[in-house]
């Protein structure tokens, strides 16, 4: 009589190289489809707006709102559920620039439609530095550039290519944006920012 847990007839052979390659390609295809769906429907990314308040207020929740930090999110329940995972996967697929433009322009539209006042802080990804806005997003881009007070938050990874950074900062300032260094203290790239 056989025990129902008997696995003596089950093959536990390792995956063949072609099986592993096929599985990797399938995962890449699924991730690409997911990221491209988020680019096509950026409202699935957010934005979420976190109020920026003056630090020296005695009652922080009563402090006046100075502006808003726009944050995005990934697709819940997937391998790109959080923003950092989403950006990492998009980078491996060469899709960060498209993703960032889609999110940035959506953020402009939502902020304007909601009547948000004060500074709008967002983080342009370094892959977009010097790149042109995709034509399908041009109306949102131009509308937001003219109507919003934008602060570009530059994080440590923005300082990896100093020449590209300098050019990007000049371009952003030409648009009337303020440039803010965020999370760079203590990093080697932070030294460049503070020169």
Image (cartoon, grey):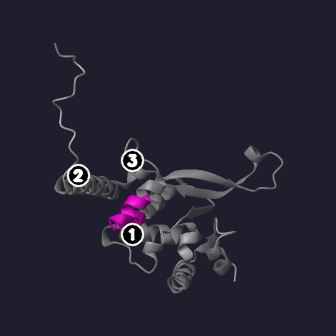
The residue sitting at the right extreme is 58
- Could you say where residue 9 lies in the image, as x and y percent from the top left? 15, 30
Is residue 110 shown left or right of residue 191?
left
Q: For numbered disc 1, what is the local secondary structure?
A: helix
Nearest the viewer among 101 and 17 is 17
Q: Which residue is mark 2?
A: 23
Nearest the viewer among 123 and 64 is 123
In magenta stretch: residue 98: yes
Q: For numbered disc 2, what is the local secondary structure?
A: helix
**Residue located at (40% from left, 78% from top):** 131
Q: Which residue is mark 1?
A: 97
Q: How many marks?
A: 3
- Could you say where residue 171 lies in the image, as x and y percent from the top left? 52, 82
Which quarter shows the N terminus? Answer: top left
Of badges 1 and 2, nearer the viewer stands 2
Q: Which residues are magenta?
A: 87-102
Q: Main secondary structure of the magenta part?
A: helix
Of badges 2 and 3, nearer the viewer stands 2
Q: Which residue is mark 3?
A: 75
């Amino acid at each position: 009589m056989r025990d129902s847990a008997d696995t003596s007839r089950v093959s536990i052979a390792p995956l063949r190289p072609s099986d592993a390659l096929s599985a990797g390609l399938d995962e890449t295809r699924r991730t690409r489809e997911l990221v491209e769906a988020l680019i096509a429907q950026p409202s699935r990314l957010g934005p979420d707006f976190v109020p920026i308040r003056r630090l020296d207020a005695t009652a922080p929740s009563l402090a006046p709102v100075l502006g808003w930090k726009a944050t995005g999110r990934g697709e819940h329940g997937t391998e790109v559920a959080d923003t950092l995972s989403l950006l990492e996967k998009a980078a491996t697929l060469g899709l960060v620039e498209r993703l960032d433009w889609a999110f940035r322009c959506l953020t402009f539209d939502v902020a304007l439609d909601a009547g948000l006042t004060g500074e709008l802080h967002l983080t342009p990804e370094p892959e977009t530095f010097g790149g042109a806005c995709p034509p399908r997003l041009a109306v949102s881009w131009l509308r937001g550039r003219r109507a919003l007070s934008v602060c570009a938050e530059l994080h440590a990874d923005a300082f990896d290519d100093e020449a590209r950074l300098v050019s990007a900062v000049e371009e952003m300032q030409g648009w009337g944006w303020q440039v803010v260094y965020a999370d760079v203290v203590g990093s080697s790239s932070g030294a460049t920012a503070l020169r």
